[in-house]
Amino acid sequence: MRFERLLVFLLVVMCAPIGLAQKNPFVGKWNITGRPPHDSYVYWLEVKEEGGRLSAMFLNRGGSPVPVEGIKLTGEELTFNLPGRSGRPLPEVQLKAAGEKITGSLKSGDQTIILAGARPPKWRDYNANARHTFGKPVDLFDGKSLDAWTVQNREKPMDWRIEDGVMTNATHGNNLVSKEKFQDFKIQAEYKLEKGSNSGIYIRGRYELQVLDDYGKEPESHGHMAIYARKAPDLNASKPAGEWQSMEATVVGNRVTVLLNGKKVHDNAVIQGITGGALDVNETEPGPVMIQGDHERVWFRKVTVTPIVNSRRSS
């Protein structure tokens, strides 16, 4: 009997390292950035393994996460290709994982970008709808000046101006970035769009709430007040182009509740990850408000942030 127990014990000990070695260290989500001089380049990756088959979604700086092609794990290296233009070699990503860190490269044409990343934060159980204590409101736009803002692309002009107490962009201008940074807060904005226009309000500079002329259309993950490419609004509350609209978002941790034109379109929704165009991947740190001005025309007459000075986890 003792011999049988000893044999079982030895088998368990011998098999345990084999089981651990078979675990894919890449499975899960990763926040990734380029190394200097490309440290402003922001990426996101999620790797899945189901039924012994690998798949992945990759966010290549802007736009939406897309399925990768030709993914394979060879030894300690994960490689895959990104969708590309017809007739050109596909961009290739090579990665190695070590615990909670990841390193590698992205080669596209003649350019090779060195990559480094880590796992996203493990969020607590936050509640955007709880009875938080708010501080003093901060008017990022007072109808008189753009002093509260800088721009994302410092090599381009601001391309925003004030007309009759309203700030507006030049078509395909620059993105506004607030000089002040915020952690947990409520943001209120009033704006209008020209027909077919597209903009966005980034909370902490990392998560885009889409601003879009989509009156009368079905809600989808790229629609007005969607958490861009992450979650569709629960309903379409848009007004027609040319009419003033209002939004209010309360963000606490990785949770957000959003009202559009007085209707709740996200209710304590989980923010699943950074969105295309994020300024950085430092998700637990305060970040600025960013307003897209690099698409079509948009007009803002109010942008007010009210910081939460004491957040609560329950309602």
Image (cartoon, rainbow, N blue to C red):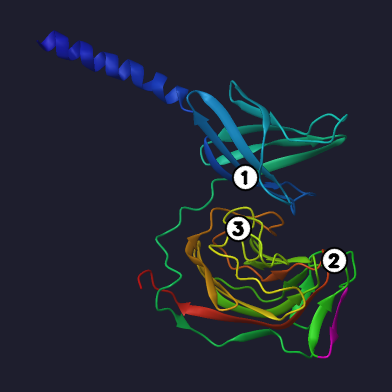
Q: If you read the primary sequence from the N terminus, does the residue marked by circle 2 or circle 3 appear first?
A: 2
Residue 255, image x, y percentages: 49, 64
Residue 254, image x, y percentages: 50, 61
What distance separates the C-alpha of mark 1 from that of mark 2?
25 Å
What distance separates the C-alpha of mark 1 from that of mark 3?
11 Å
Amino acid beneath label 2: Arg
- For image coordinates 58% across by 25% down, the residue present is 76
Tag shown at residue 117: 1
- Which residue extends farthest front? 216
The answer to whether residue 260 shows anywhere in this view is: yes
Residue 128, image x, y percentages: 46, 70
Q: If you read the primary sequence from the N terminus, does the residue marked by circle 1 or circle 2 appear first?
A: 1
Give the residue pinned by disc 3.
282
Task: Indicate the secondary structure of the residue bearing disc 3.
Answer: loop
Horizontal side of residue 17 vs 159, given as left or right: left
Residue 11, image x, y percentages: 28, 14
Tag shown at residue 154: 2
Amino acid beneath label 1: Gly
